[in-house]
Amino acid sequence: MARKKKTDRQDPVREAPEAPITQQYITETIEKNYMPYVMSVIVSRAIPAIDGFKPAHRKLLYTMYKMGLMNGPRQKCANIVGQTMRLNPHGNDAIYETLVRLTRDHAALLHPFIDSKGGFGKQYSSGPYSAPRYTEARLEKFSAEIFSGIEKNAVDMVDNYDGTMKEPALMPTTFPNVLVTPNMGIAVGMASNICSFNLNEICDGTIALLRNPRTDTEKLMDIIKAPDFAGGGQIIYTRDKMREIFETGSGSVRVRSKYTYDPQANCIDISEIPYSTTIEQIIKQVTDLIKEGKFKEITDIRDEIGLSGFRLTIDIRRGTDPDQLMAKLFRATTLEDSFKCNFNILIGSVPQQMGVRRILEEWIKYRIECYSRELRYDLDKKKEKLHLLMGLGRILLDIDKAIKIIRGTEKDADVIPNLCAGFSIDVPQAEFIADIKLRNLNREYILNRIKDIDELQKQIAAIEETLADELKLKKCIASQLGDIKKKYGQPRRSEIIHEHEITVAAPVEEIENYPAHFFLTSEGYFKKITALSLRGNDEHKLKEGDTIMSEAEGDNLTDLFFFTDKGQLYRARACDFDTCKASAMGEFIPAKLGFDPGEKPIFMKVGAEWNEAHNMVFIFENGKGLRVPQSVYQTKGNRRKLTGAFSTASPIVGIFEEEKPFDILTVTSNDRAAVISTSLIPIKATRSSIGVQLITLRADAKISGVWRDFADKFESTKGYKKIKIPAAPVLLVEKDIEKMQIKLDI
């Protein structure tokens, strides 16, 4: 059947009906659309409540509690994250990040809530943590204190986001967790940043307020001395600033790193850093300052964190005062940093900024309410049990009657009404009696059960008395705090020091920057000459037999890298050398940089950074060559010396820096030559590689020289050019030998 021919006819365009335009005041738009979002972020996401948790923390911990992870073995974190999504639908990555922060291994909390196993990273490092499928977790024993009373109606239970489960609106914490666990949140138009305090001090301070609500701020500051951070450090204590935090909840705490000086190794070991910084940030800051020429005293900085714990090591030059150097570093880097306090907390879904004293007062109110609800739950259960036992006591008078009633009742539904009528008891009492096993319908069993009546009556009276007296409630809460302190308390991690104990730093010397020319001789002498000085006076003074080996341009803050014949790499700054004239001999590099005996420089690289797109090319005496990316020379910090810069299996003949491939002339000891492109040399990922064979050599031959710029020194390079390796060198013609002897000084 023939297909119908397509036509150019198009369906008419249907115009959409115009939507009606309604006018609305901007205030009304904000109220209806923006404000609900704002309140959702504040109340349901970013700001912690009086229990010390944000909703994400609360949902995660409660999920682990319901999974039975208070006891028993750890479970995969991937499983925990998946279960938590029933309460928190914001994504598994966000949930896992929350879990990581609450773990012991992450070291962010003074008292972790989660016992962890695996790679959870560290709070003091920006490094990654393992995926949840590789890590395991369970609740710490300490976590029992945040769930105490949760099964006894201590807090309200609310619906989750889809109404399929119940979750606690708050946690019934038995201690002021809000001041023990650090918390940070950024909402809309407000933020919260709460530091941690020592558990012992917080318990003592709370007990003092429970016993005497009129305890003044000064007395409270004597008990709760200052914040206490998981990472330790030294808190620079100022009474006035601390009073501001205690009264307003706003202010800052200065924290500096803790260090020791090792005179044998001539290095500074930093063991603790401020909570608000990371080791990577510190290393970058110090490295940048060294590049700017402000810290010539430092030769190397490196991360030595291992199984033994945290350690950041700074190598210093001989004669450097370590205390003065650290004082300068404290002023210039986050080795000393400030923790900005903003104690913004939700009280009844209303954000309020409060000082330490008022937070403790609000927590006491909250704890009294939780503990009262727990007591009322116990009271109801005991009253219910007493009521049942009172009914049981009635049948003690005539057990045979009870048996007769049950036996004589034809229908099962009539058993309970008949017992109620026969003994003048209510339905719950009758059901309790009816459910007793036949073997227990004896006087001994019933007498043993009703013995508890007197004890129950005493307990009920005691609970009712406690509930009616706020002082007794506070006494019970204080007793709980004392037990918590005894069980979980630990010494302060952050040492408190005062202003007068601090070493004052000398002013940081500003280093002038200016253009300069750099020269390196074959004997190891280095010259830094300004452009003005070099102009019209470029005749260099050299030792007899010495020649200029390398020449480059830069400035006074430029990094200089020296490769040596021993396979080592030394780093220096141009500002480390004195400016001289061409008529001066220059500074002897081996002595200046502390070379090993007999070691001399053979190549100078000038530049601030190693370029990942560039390569280093090495040519060896045995005819082998090596090409490695410059990125392999990148090191953490600012290492002054790098061993194993290249292989020393064969003596080095030439070193080149490659931005793009170029030709190299190689000449052998038996007057043979080959021109090889660096593109033929395979790139190796390691500096220690011995390279690949570039040219074939006779048993008694070796490479005697290599050159990069040689095109104008030959009649023609055509006969020496090679397109593959290993290549057979070609015998030099007589006229090229003569030119090379004149121009290249072989």
Image: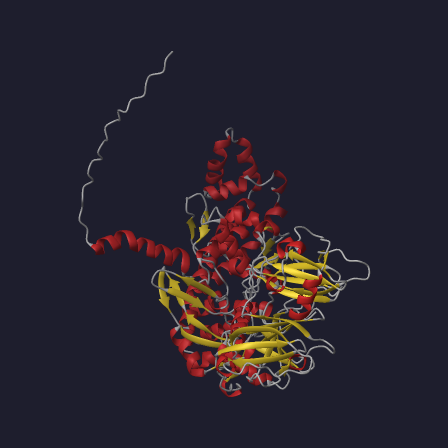
The quadrant in which residue 730 appears is: bottom right
Q: How far across and how far down the image is residue 514, in percent?
A: 48, 79
Residue drawn where x is 69% and y is 75% of the image = 600
Q: Is residue 117 above or below residue 574?
A: above
Frontmost residue, 30 versus 590: 590
Q: Residue furthest right?
A: 699
Q: In the figure, is residue 180 to the left or right of 192?
A: right
Q: How far across and how far down the image is residue 515, in percent?
A: 49, 77
Q: In the figure, is residue 158 to the left or right of 718?
A: left
Residue drawn where x is 41% and y is 65% of the image = 192
Query: Which quarter of the figure is the C terminus placed in?
Result: bottom right
Q: Is residue 112 visible?
A: yes
The quadrant in which residue 304 appears is: bottom right
Q: Is residue 123 above or below residue 266?
A: above
- Tally of numbered tags: 0
Q: Residue furthest top?
A: 1
Q: Residue furthest front?
A: 735
Frontmost residue, 722 versus 230: 722
Q: Is residue 327 above or below residue 33?
A: below
Q: Is residue 687 visible?
A: no
The quadrant in which residue 651 appears is: bottom right
Query: Which quarter of the figure is the N terminus placed in?
Result: top left
Frontmost residue, 344 versus 744: 744
Q: How far across and how far down the image is residue 238, in percent?
A: 46, 82
Q: How far across and how far down the image is residue 689, in percent?
A: 71, 59
Color style of the picture: secondary structure
Frontmost residue, 217 versus 573: 573
